[in-house]
Amino acid sequence: MDEILSSLFNLNGRVAIITGGAGLLGRQHAEAIARAGGIPVLIDIAAAQPALRASQLAEQWQTQVVGFEADITKLDQLEALKNQILAQFGRIDILINNAANNPKMESGSTVQFSRVENFPCEVWEADLAVGLTGSFLSSRVFGTEMALRGSGVIVNIASDLALIAPDQRLYRKEGLPEDRQPVKPVTYSVVKSGLIGLTRYLATYWAKNGVRVNAISPGGVYTSQPEDFVQRLSSLIPLGRMAHIGEYQGAILFLCSDASSYMTGSNLVIEGGRTCL
């Protein structure tokens, strides 16, 4: 039985591209891939230092991890990157669409513009460009390559807020008038909901080509946010807490491996029970 389970979750030699790979969850996804024998390829903007993050992971897990700088909203950069990865590894097996603009609302830093009445069009366009257009273009470039080979996996990182509306009471600040209260930006819900739609579309589009496409909808991850925010959010979650940083690794491994070989077009919801209330 151990050998059977091991083979189901084995990613030996499989090349996994992770957009936003140098970020908080991107590194966790990469660690899950590396621990299963896969080769994580971190894609991120220059400021995120993907090559440095890749070298750190490679040293930590004594395995091969590489990082490349790219703007996933630029088709030519993705095409060049695909050719570079194929030249180095000869294959692309997995794409995790993880990149997104995600303002940290608990800091209150977006009070001035987060409300719909004041939300800047340029921020709307930038958020959708990274979260939706970037995921579409990455899927187009790397998914097409997998489809040509007859096998592959795409995992889109959505959110519990693709299934429920944000509870804006979480972000309220005492003493501020109503029209200045911070809120979770509209683009976050739109992008994450769109990713589930993209998942279903691509799952049926490439099914005959052996490419499986699924999504994961995680809940909030605890990263030392202000205590009042943590308490408010935890009170809405049946398990009574936010997620630990590594708690999505099992889901990522499941969706990327042969353990989920008969699963496509699905959204794996892992949010401590929040959306079942």
Image: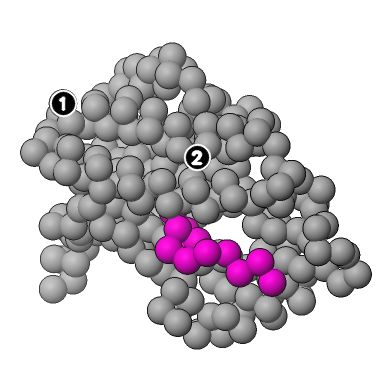
**Magenta segment range?**
157-169
Q: Is residue 34 left or right of residue 100?
A: left
Location of residue 119 in the rendering, given as x and y in whole percent from the top left corner? 70, 43
Residue 162 part of the magenta-drawn span: yes
Q: Please, what secondary structure does the residue beneath circle 1 have?
A: helix
**Residue for point 72% across, 66% down:** 171
Residue 101 part of the magenta-drawn span: no
Tell me if residue 159 comes above or below residue 149 in the rendering.
Answer: below
Tell me if residue 234 comes above or below residue 102 in the rendering.
Answer: below
Location of residue 137 in the rendering, given as x and y in whole percent from the top left corner? 39, 28
Location of residue 45 in the rendering, given as x and y in whole percent from the top left corner? 59, 30
> In this view of the protein, which residue sits in the foreground, 69 or 233?
233
Quadrant in which the C terminus is drawn: bottom left
**Residue for point 77% across, 68% down:** 172
Q: Is residue 205 left or right of residue 174?
A: left
Location of residue 207 in the rendering, given as x and y in whole percent from the top left corner? 13, 42
Q: Identify the residue under disc 1.
A: 148
N-terminal of the two: label 1 or label 2? 2
How busy is the neighbourhood of tag 2: few (under 14 within 10 Å), some, or many (20 plus)? many
> In this view of the protein, which residue sits in the foreground, 91 or 37?
91
Residue 154: quadrant of the picture: top left
Q: What is the number of the mark on residue 44?
A: none
Q: Please, what secondary structure does the residue beneath circle 2 have?
A: helix
The mark tally for this picture is: 2
Three-letter code, disc 2: Gly
Q: Identify the residue under disc 2.
A: 131
Three-letter code, disc 1: Leu
Q: Is residue 38 visible?
A: no
> In this view of the protein, which residue sits in the foreground, 27 or 108?
108
> In this view of the protein, which residue sits in the foreground, 191 or 252?
191
- C-alpha separation, residue under disc 1 versus residue under disc 2: 25 Å
